[in-house]
Image: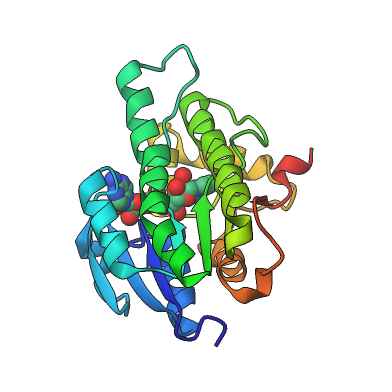
Amino acid sequence: MRLQGKKAFITAAGQGIGRAIAEAYIAEGAIVTATDLNGDLLTGIGAAHAFALDVTDKAALQSAVTAAAPDILVNCAGFVHAGSIAEATDPEFDFAMNLNVRSQFHSMQAALPGMVERGTGAIVNIASVASSIIAAPNRFIYGMSKAAIIGMTKSVALDYVARGIRCNCICPGTIESPSLQDRLRATGDYDAARAAFVARQPMGRIGQPPEIAALALYLGSDESSFTTGQAHVIDGGWATG
Ligand code: NAD
């Protein structure tokens, strides 16, 4: 059991990547606090604690993280805004910053004092390969917000490296999830959109949430004890060229 007895706090654990990470952590012996905006999605997850939590509610998020006192914090909540700079609006920009970026700032800020006190901690932020790694078509706001996560991750990693705390982020490529299905349907031609997504994958397929969970397990566990401040790309070769 690679996470035996470790306390983990996970946002957006109801479906997709967050759900797969929660299940992998539970299977490896972690005491998981699983949260999601939609509490109904957490039914049957098997976590030690599971409750509805909107990560854009700073007070609720910070008090939940402080109470959980996690050894491992996984910030997974995020939203994909579709469109180029031409279609971007200020409210959409603010929404993405609040949900994708500010929530991770707030949860890390709440988790760090306890980690410092205990002299140990691992933070895993979910960014995206669509960020400062590569540009993806029509991901202006999204890519901006995910690039900010890489910057926050490196800053926290450097400032806390001497206090036993590691902070890494994961940059997934295109991964099968309920919201990916929504995005494909929203194009109006599901089959063509899916074929286009697959065509840009050197491996010829879209990734699966457990493949991301395996990396999150590594980064949350002591196996990655010499790794901090990195943006870990896991994208089926998309960013290779
Ligand atoms: P998803 O988009 O299907 O599900 C997202 C989950 O987040 C849902 O359970 C939803 O209820 C929850 N959520 C939404 N708003 C929330 C809020 N305010 N507070 C708390 N929870 C909230 O899952 P996914 O596609 O696996 O995406 C998870 C993360 O992975 C996101 O940060 C996303 O940007 C990132 N990501 C996904 C892909 C992909 O292709 N699926 C690629 C790169 C990065």
**Number of marks drawn:** 0
Q: Is residue 5 visible?
A: yes
Instruction: Give the residue furthest to the right.
Output: 241
Q: Is residue 185 visible?
A: no
Indicate the quadrant where residue 32 lies. bottom left
Identify the residue at image location x=58%, y=38%: 151
Q: Quadrant of the N terminus?
A: bottom right
Identify the residue at image location x=38%, y=38%: 102
233 vs 95, left or right, is right
Placement of 114 over or under 7, stated as above or below: above
Placement of 65 over or under 49, stated as above or below: above
Find residue 111 and report its horizontal and vertical position in percent.
Answer: 39, 59
Find residue 48 and report its horizontal and vertical position in percent.
Answer: 30, 79
179 vs 121, left or right, is left
Indicate the quadrant where residue 200 lies. top right
Q: Quadrant of the C terminus?
A: top right
Find residue 182 and report its horizontal and vertical position in percent.
Answer: 37, 43
Identify the residue at image location x=44%, y=29%: 82
Identify the residue at image location x=38%, y=24%: 93
Find residue 74 and report its horizontal and vertical position in percent.
Answer: 45, 60
